[in-house]
Amino acid sequence: MSRKSDPSFVLELPLAVSPHESRVLSSRFEAGRQLYNAVLGEAVRRVDLMKQSRAWAAARKMPKGPPKSPEKKARAAEFSLIAETVGFSDYDIQSYATRCKNACWIGDHLDAQTTQKIGTRVFTAAQRYQFRTGGRPRFKPKWKVLESMEGKSNATGLRWREDHIEWNGLSLKARYDKKDKHGIQAFALQNPLKYRRLVRRTIRGKTRWFVQLVLAGSPKWKDKNPVRHVKSSIDIGPSTIAAVSEAGAFLERFCANMPDLQKEIRRIQRAMDRSRRRSNPDNYNQDGTVKKPAPGKRLQWVYTNGYLHLRARLRELHRVLAAYRRTEHGEPANRVVAMGNTVMAEKLSYKTFQRMFGKSVRDRAPGTFMDHLRRKAASAGGEVIEFPTRTTKLSQSCQCGAVVKKPLSKRWHDCSCGVHAQRDLYSAYLGLHVRKNVETWKLDTESAR
Ligand SMILES: [Zn+2]
């Protein structure tokens, strides 16, 4: 058995689905949504019951103790005893899901395996609420369909067979990329299958179905350029990316082709807000804030057709942005890794980034780019090494040892020692010469010289 933390990657293939099959799948997903909600209601009830009990209050007062100490163990044992009494465990929630399914129409649409998976999904959500790492989990309203369903093992239930998905009488063929120019698919399918999901997406207003195969290992390196097994280094600014290695260098605008959709997104959000207010005047206070519902009650919201259209449009815009981001991130990531598969990068605080440069950075998502780069480097047999800016200060440093703060507007590094270089490229260059000395990362000026 491979563990969840082992490296894995996803191969997603579109499914050929007839209109009839699409209807069957939709009703199964709807059954899944309703089951999710029913089980969630019960799970949250059990968590609340647990938290209101006297035993819980007593357990909370027990000494916490350091990790692995007898105190800590005793406290944990007490908590799990309480969870056992109210029936709050993965197993209990799964069996509640099964009972729920068998008691009503949902049983006609779902099999035992997917039902148990939904139980586990609810349990994890409710557990986050129990441990306060997440808020009170929400019910999935009708319009927010379930996005994916999973099977448990490849023996029964939702199964992957060679080139198609089998699920409860349905057999859905996957559409392979026939050319598979770089042999990515063929390579991926040789890896052991960890699990498979059926995914539903709305693309330009149409429902599409996909199978996601989660495979163990790393995807194939597909760039035409052979990977160099040397160091490379990058510098990401709010709008640029600079990369340097012994094989070359480049400086370009980061996500240059991202369309600016923020204006339109804001326009739609405002229109949605106006529409919501117009059709639900009773849900607002005089000052425009949303009313607090009476205890035990929930506010009733009316959504007009116009509102639903706006919401669909908004989702489509977000989908388009995400799709752009994938290509805009993929290309430079490939080039960097081809230049050198051990990538040096400053550990950036993207929060500060956002505070300084606003929404445009959110669209470009440098954090997501770094995730992308890490996966790419790993698939090329390398890695991304991040070092802190605090001790290295590359944007202020020079190979002669001088450290001078420059304003952001100054795009060139000019030093009295004679170095004259473009600022971003130069700090990427210096990144090649950062070393870890015992515990701290430092710029090795001698090596840089
Ligand atoms: Zn200098």
Image (cartoon, rainbow, N blue to C red):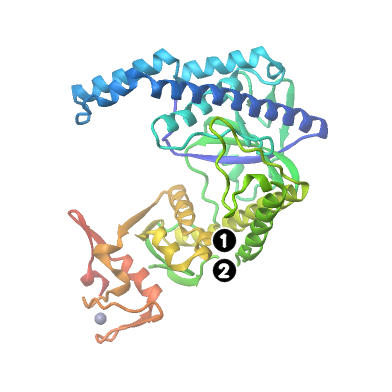
Q: Does the CB distance between marks 2 and 1 fall below 8 Å?
A: yes
Q: Is residue 160 above or below residue 253?
A: above
> Helix or strand or loop: what does disc 2 sit on?
loop
The local crowd at label 2, few if under 14, some if 14 to 19, many if 20 or more residues have their Cα within 10 Å, is few
Return the x and y of residue 117 as percentages of the image width and height: 55, 24
Return the x and y of residue 309 as percentages of the image width and height: 75, 50
Residue at x-position 24% and y-position 19%: 74
Which residue is the extreme one toward the front? 286
Query: Which quadrant of the figure shows ligand 1?
Result: bottom left
Of 45 and 214, the residue lying toward us: 45
Q: Is residue 87 above or below residue 1?
A: above
Three-letter amino acid code at the position of disc 1? Glu
> Helix or strand or loop: what does disc 1 sit on?
helix
Q: Is residue 98 above or below residue 277?
A: above
Of 370 and 406, the residue lying toward us: 406
Q: Quadrant of residue 70?
A: top left
Residue 230 appears in the picture as rendered: no
Of 58 and 442, the residue lying toward us: 58
Q: Which residue is mark 1?
A: 328
Q: CA distance from mark 2 to mark 1?
A: 8 Å
Q: What label sits on residue 439 in the rendered view?
A: none
Return the x and y of residue 410 as percentages of the image width and height: 39, 81
Residue at x-position 51% and y-position 34%: 137
Residue at x-position 21% and y-position 75%: 401
The quadrant in which the C terminus is found is: bottom left
| Residue 136 left/right relative to 430 | right
| Residue 360 left/right relative to 85 | right
Residue 399 appears in the picture as rendered: yes
Q: Which residue is mark 2?
A: 256
Three-letter amino acid code at the position of disc 2? Ala
Residue at x-position 65% and y-position 59%: 270
